[in-house]
Image (tube, helix red, strand yellow):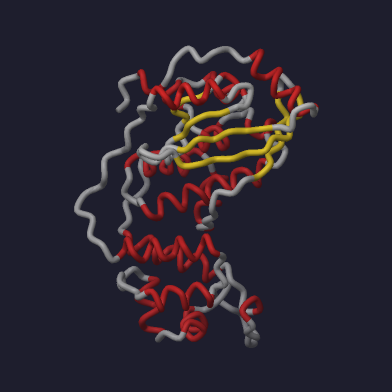
């Protein structure tokens, strides 16, 4: 089930509203007055004053009625809300998109992975590596890249999606000791992608499914957090090879429709590297690839 369709102006409005209600008066140097505040976080008039815009103008922004804020207004709102660099960049992208007219949703990107990229995955062994779409569909992988996500291979190839795995696969909470941190980052990345492509069918379909099936996803989705992709270390409690602490890196693949390469590494000679070697040796070779199915 796809979520309700929203315009780009609506997306800009929802982001501003979410950030405003999660920003306390004390955090921006304001002293709350006496009495009960009906709204958590900043009031509209407080944010408008901090940003140097009229209350009427800001109200139109937050209601999706004003879709052409200038760069100066966007920067002023970002400062007032104390957005970090990633959030500020996302707000700018939302404003740019809100000012454009998109007559129809774009088609979903191709799921086809080029042969030389599949070969690249094989050359990375024993490091777990895979290629995902912008909506986190697993499009190609080497043996350890799939086996690292315990139980994911049990799903049909076209259903293998990292966001779906984190929220809906029963093994995910056991695999990640910091599951709450992992899912928060996952939702934030999807939010950032969906914010700039709100009508993309691959994204709206995935989000709609997770909103319907996962209360945890729905709660995080409403928070409207966006973050960038950063090199991080992830810890796994894998049912086959035990504990692994691996460095994670992802990167855009040039000349592809938004595909990204993800790879994990460990320092040679460490127990983590030994466990990674064992994972690669014991992982079965993939029997099918999603791009071989008629899904394009």
The x and y percentages for residue 250 are 54, 40
Q: Quadrant of residue 10?
A: bottom left
The x and y percentages for residue 44 are 47, 79
Residue pictured at 58% horizontal, 12% vertical: 284
With 263 as the anchor, is 102 left or right in this view? left
Residue closest to the eye, 24 or 88:
88
Residue closest to the eye, 102 or 25:
102
Q: Against 113, is 46 above or below? A: below
With 232 as the anchor, is 193 left or right in this view? left
The x and y percentages for residue 101 are 23, 60
The x and y percentages for residue 96 are 33, 64
Q: Against 85, is 269 above or below? A: above
Residue pictured at 34% horizontal, 74% vertical: 69
Quadrant in the picture for the C terminus = top left
Residue pictured at 43% horizontal, 19% vertical: 289
Residue closest to the eye, 35 or 61:
61
């Amino acid at each position: 089930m796809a979520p309700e369709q929203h315009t780009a102006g609506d997306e800009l409005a929802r982001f501003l509203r979410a950030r405003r209600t999660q920003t306390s008066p004390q955090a921006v140097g304001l002293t709350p007055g006496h009495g009960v505040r009906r709204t958590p976080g900043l009031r509209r008039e407080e944010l408008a004053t901090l940003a140097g815009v009229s209350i009427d103008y800001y109200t139109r922004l937050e209601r999706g009625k004003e879709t052409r804020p200038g760069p100066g207004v966007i920067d002023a709102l970002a400062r007032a809300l104390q957005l970090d660099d990633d959030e500020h960049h996302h707000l700018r992208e939302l404003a740019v998109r809100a000012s454009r007219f998109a007559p129809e949703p774009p088609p979903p990107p191709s799921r086809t992975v080029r042969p030389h990229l599949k070969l690249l995955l094989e050359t990375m062994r024993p490091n777990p590596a895979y290629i995902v779409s912008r909506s986190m569909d697993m499009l190609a992988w080497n043996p350890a890249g799939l086996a690292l996500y315990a139980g994911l291979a049990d799903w049909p190839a076209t259903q293998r999606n990292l966001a779906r795995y984190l929220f809906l696969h029963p093994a995910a909470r056991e695999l990640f000791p910091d599951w709450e941190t992992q899912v928060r980052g996952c939702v934030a990345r999807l939010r950032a992608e969906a914010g700039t492509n709100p009508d993309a069918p691959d994204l709206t379909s995935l989000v709609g499914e997770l909103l319907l099936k996962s209360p945890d996803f729905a709660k995080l989705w409403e928070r409207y957090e966006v973050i960038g992709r950063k090199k991080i270390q992830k810890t796994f409690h894998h049912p086959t090879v035990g504990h692994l602490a691996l460095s994670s890196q992802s990167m855009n693949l040039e000349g592809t429709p938004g595909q990204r390469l993800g790879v994990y590494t460990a320092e040679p000679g460490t127990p983590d590297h030994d466990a990674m070697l064992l994972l690669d040796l014991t992982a079965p070779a993939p029997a099918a690839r999603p791009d071989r199915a008629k899904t394009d």
